[in-house]
Image: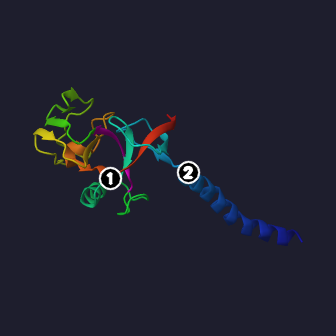
Amino acid sequence: MPRTRTIARRALFPVVLCAGIAIPLLSFELLGLRIALTDSACPPGIYRMVSRAPSRGDLVLACLPDAIAQLGSARGYLLRGRGCGDGIEPVGKRLSALPGDSVEVVPDYVAVNGQRLQHSATLLRDSRDRSVEHVPWGRYTVPTNQVWLFGTKDARSWDSRYFGPVPASSVRAALEPVLTW
């Protein structure tokens, strides 16, 4: 009889382990929670997707257009993940410029409607010392149905100063902090 219990316990272990992983993951998905582990746009932590139209300055979750996402993945800036059609994780960035806004990109900073963004100097090399392409220096008027996304907590953020505006439809939701560290 004790041998049967040992076999049953061993058989039950993988089930309990899978449930211990699946239940929190499913709960996160059902509650619209996301974990941010990088600090380019916000403190690391747990964020909740909220059902309201995002506005300027909001932290948002966005799926980058395929070509941009593929480049980010190839360079190691983005990971594979769920949530976007191309199989690359969505990004969390600040919605900094909306249609009609003026965006100025110069080597030392980016300004939106004349207001300089923090930590927005455009880097010419990434953290692996590889050259990084950026949008051409100059002033831009954000076209209809486009937005500019920035990570202004860290100068190393790979964002619209490098790849330019993205379709407004790329923005999936506004994010609000639940727990940060």
* Residue 77 seen from this side: no
Q: Position of residue 80 (x, y in %)?
A: 39, 59
Q: Which mark is residue 28?
A: 2
The correct choice, above or below, for 14 with respect to 75 in the image is: below
The correct choice, above or below, for 115 with respect to 62 in the image is: above
Q: Position of residue 36 (x, y in %)?
A: 44, 44
Horizontal placement of 179 versus 85: left or right? Answer: right
Displayed quadrant of residue 149: top left
Camera-nearest residue between 75 and 113: 113
Q: Residue at x 22, y 28 (%)?
A: 116
Labels 2, 1: front one: 1
Quadrant into which the N terminus falls: bottom right
The correct choice, above or below, for 58 with respect to 116 in the image is: below
Three-letter residue code for mark 1: Ser
Task: Say which label, 2 or 1, has the lower sequence index.
Answer: 2
Q: Is residue 74 magenta?
A: no
Q: Residue furthest right?
A: 1
Q: What SS does tag 2 mark?
A: helix
Q: Residue at x 16, y 31 (%)?
A: 108
Three-letter residue code for mark 2: Phe
